[in-house]
Image (cartoon, rainbow, N blue to C red):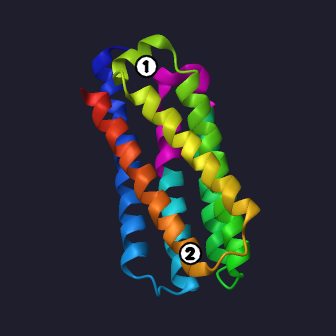
């Protein structure tokens, strides 16, 4: 695939970053947000991201060997989104565990993708895109593990942590998508 063809594919990272930034800002701006609203926002965000990643994985013929990772990631996001929406009356701790699992899955996927991207694709996406993907994955993994270890933290602290995490990961993905165009 040509460099131009690869660069057309970076829209997914930019979209992913924008959705996470909006999700994080909404969560920060309304700290008194109820758990039900948070769960619905989280569930909807996972469904939308899952569908986008699934479509991207199914249409990304240029990925060849790693295409199945995007399909798997998209399906996992959709399942997590459905669980969040169907268990909207769950406790804050259950939602914290659900979010932690998502962050760990995202982190592992991004570290894997960032670490094993073929050289020609990494060069086409820009010199910082690979590093930003690995950094984003590492941060996701750390946050996921921390939430698994300390699920009993107050829901407000959890919401602020999730909001900060979403904004940071969103900015890193947005920067990675923009760096892909340079």
Residue visible at 45% across and 62% down in the picture: 164
Residue 152 percent coordinates (x, y): 73, 75
Task: Identify the image quadrant of the C terminus.
Answer: top left
Residue 22 percent coordinates (x, y): 36, 64
136 shown above or below 114: below
The answer to which quarter of the image holds residue 110 is top right
Q: Is residue 159 left or right of residue 175?
A: right
Q: Main secondary structure of the magenta part?
A: helix
Residue 87 percent coordinates (x, y): 69, 78
- Mark 2: which secondary structure? helix
Residue 181 percent coordinates (x, y): 26, 29
Q: Say whether disc 2 or disc 1 marks the residue closer to the N-terminus.
A: 1
Magenta stretch? 52-68
143 shown above or below 172: below
Q: Is residue 82 left or right of residue 149?
A: left
Cα separation between marks 2 and 1? 37 Å
54 shown above or below 10: below
Disc sitting over residue 122 in the figure: 1
70 shown above or below 140: above
Examine the rendering and report whether any part of residue 17 can be seen.
yes
| Front residue of this view, candidates 64 and 104 | 104
Q: Residues within 10 Å of mark 1 (few under 14, many from 20)?
A: some
- Mark 1: which secondary structure? helix
Judging by the rendered image, the residue that carries numbered circle 2 is: 157
């Amino acid at each position: 695939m040509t460099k131009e063809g690869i660069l057309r594919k970076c829209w997914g990272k930019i979209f992913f970053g924008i959705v996470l930034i909006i999700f994080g800002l909404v969560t920060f701006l309304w700290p008194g947000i109820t758990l039900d609203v948070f769960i619905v926002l989280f569930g909807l965000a996972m469904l939308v991201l899952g569908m986008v990643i699934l479509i991207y994985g199914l249409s990304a013929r240029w990925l060849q060997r790693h295409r199945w990772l995007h399909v798997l990631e998209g399906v996992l996001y959709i399942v997590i989104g459905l669980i969040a929406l169907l268990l909207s009356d769950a406790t804050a701790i259950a939602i914290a565990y659900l979010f932690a699992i998502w962050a760990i899955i995202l982190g592992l996927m991004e570290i894997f993708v960032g670490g094993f991207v073929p050289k020609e694709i990494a060069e086409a996406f820009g010199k910082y895109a690979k590093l930003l993907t690995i950094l984003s994955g590492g941060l996701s993994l750390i946050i996921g593990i921390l939430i698994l270890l300390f699920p009993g933290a107050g829901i407000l602290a959890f919401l602020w942590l999730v909001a900060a995490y979403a904004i940071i990961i969103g900015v890193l993905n947005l920067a990675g998508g923009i760096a892909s165009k340079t």
